Image (cartoon, rainbow, N blue to C red):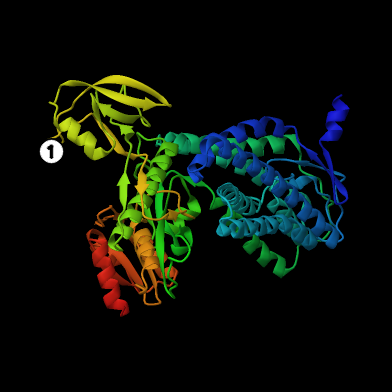
Amino acid sequence: MRSRIRRALLLPLAGTVVRIDSWWLLILPPAAWALATLGIPLFAPALTPAEGWWAALLTLLCGMGSLLAHIAAHILAARRCDAPLPPELPLLPFGEPAQLWPQPRDPWRATLTALAAPLCHLLLALLAYIVWNQQLHPIISTVATLLLLGNGALALASLAPGYPLDGARITLAVAWELGFPARGALLARRIGWLSALALAIWGGGVIATQGRVSLPTGMVTLGIALMLALTLWRIPAPRPMIIRSPAGSTMAWIISGIVIPLQLLGPLSLLPMVDGIYAPGSAVAVEPVITIPPGRPQRHQGGFLLTTVISQTPITLGQWAHARSNPAYEIVAPERVVPRDVEPQELVRQSFQMLEESEAQAIVAALRLAGYRAELVSTAVAVQAVLEESPNAVVLQAGDLIVRVGDTPTPSIAALSDALAQQQAGERIVLTLERGGTMQQVNVTLLPPAEGGTTPRIGVSVQNYGLDLDLPFAVQITPQKIVGGPSAGLMFALTIYNMLSPDDLTGGQRVAGTGTIDIDGRVGPIGGVTQKIAAAETAGARYFVVPSANYAEAARAARTITLIPVETMQEAVEKLRSLTGD
């Protein structure tokens, strides 16, 4: 039976045999669980749990394919260079150990075969980006995002100049050319052990910062260090043939001073930092994501662009260094990206809900301004988070739907506020909730009004839930390349209005912008305006519509773009018509 299992794990590949290492039996199940329950919700909050599992399994399958492509790239390059092949190679989480490859006769051909795999990962990352950019399906886009990140990281990490990574073969090739191959192999092995030790120390330092993201980040770093150490322990370095040449050419010495430092830069750029970052995102064309019944959309030459911000924690050392030299980037405390009292997955889910609400409000505001009757009605009030100091924290939780206060229905935040305004601070009242599909009643104590307010509170942050649209015709927004937040509302609304209008608000230009919007067309402030202007200027936009409250910050960031400060959608329409001549 054991021999049958072993044969089942052997895969012939281009003249050698790839053995699926037994490590995968330990790695794949927890990796699938972590991806489906923790990772996928961060990248694709719109996916259902079942879709998340499909995305996780497809990601792992494609990831294994990437590693097989890694080995195949080495084999094909070795055949092209007439280099010897090993009879069998184990497939490990990062590929195959570099020290298992036989020593070639030409050290510089060894360098070419070593570089084939990092190049392969770069090509796979490019392919993943192309697929993501097409936005074919939410599951496919999610898998493409993860493959883009994974292959990009492997391309850089595999350049490390120590065993068991591909860069060690470059180290050995340089050492051979300089005349000391035996010491080169020892150097590559020592660099591998030092890398594992450095990663362990770095991971321990990350954990010691005791920040919100430090424990998982540090544990992942320690896991990589352990994986490298176990590989070095299981597979010793080869003993290359000692040649008599005491020293290599002058060019070899020059190359050795350039190649190995460059090899270090890639892996070092991946070291995790517990800081957060705000970075320019993309400028996305809005019209392709909006669907209006045939015959109604007007064709225009110009177009609106919505702008995004990348908010991330933890970040890498490379991102940190780049942000330090670019004014459009901002390094922030990790708590500004993910607050201490909110789980990252919950934060992303809340952000996605705000995006959905923003879409509905944009549709209503645009249709009303275009002269149509449109209404937006919510069905309940969703609890986003419960304040730690709230006495109701033991009976309320994020995700609860508040249906009634006493006998008074609460289909919206306004209705909830009106119901609470009839009560007194300190009074105990009955809330009817929907939790997990089940109706239940809980007793809560009312807190005093917030400073400057008059309405008692229950100590939660809330948002409208179950928004129902009453429209004269169907309008649908299918956002692409954005996963949350309300700041695209203004650009959604302007695009819908423009699609229904015979006049082109853009005047044939590319008009970017940002801003929240409500059903009455009022424009609200947003965050990250500096990064959004940078994204708009990179995309070649001529104008940028910005909330008046953000104008001062926007004016400091704008270089080539013309700002249009607005407080309402009506004002945005009037100013655009004045500027573009329509």
The residue beneath circle 1 is 453
Q: Which quadrant would residue 287 be assigned to in this image?
A: bottom left
- In this view, the residue farthest toward the bottom is 581
Location of the C terminus (image quadrant): bottom left
| Place of residue 236 in the rendered image (x, y in percent of width and height, measured from the top left) | 76, 39
Q: Which quadrant would residue 493 be assigned to in this image?
A: bottom left
Looking at the image, which is closer to me, 487 or 471? Answer: 471
Q: Residue at x 37, y 23 (%)?
A: 439
Q: Residue at x 40, y 36 (%)?
A: 212
Location of the N terminus (image quadrant): top right
Q: Residue at x 47, y 38 (%)?
A: 205
Q: Which quadrant would residue 459 be assigned to in this image?
A: top left
| Place of residue 548 in the rendered image (x, y in percent of width and height, measured from the top left) | 23, 62
Number of marks drawn: 1
- Placement of 453 over or under 506, stated as above or below: above
Would residue 392 be seen by someone viewing this image from the given angle? Answer: no
Is residue 200 shown left or right of residue 336?
A: right
Is residue 467 shown left or right of residue 80?
A: left
Q: Residue at x 81, y 57 (%)?
A: 76
- Placement of 345 over or under 436, stated as above or below: below
Amino acid type for the residue under numbered disc 1:
Gly
Looking at the image, which is closer to me, 377 or 258? Answer: 377
Would residue 501 be seen by someone viewing this image from the given angle? Answer: yes
Is residue 126 shown left or right of residue 558?
A: right
Is residue 347 shown left or right of residue 40?
A: left
- Placement of 401 over or under 286, stated as above or below: above
Crowd tier of the residue under label 1, counting other residues whose Cα lies within 10 Å: few below 14, some 14–19, many 20 or above: few
Label 1: element kind: loop
| Place of residue 386 in the rendered image (x, y in percent of width and height, measured from the top left) | 30, 30
| Place of residue 567 in the rendered image (x, y in percent of width and height, measured from the top left) | 22, 61
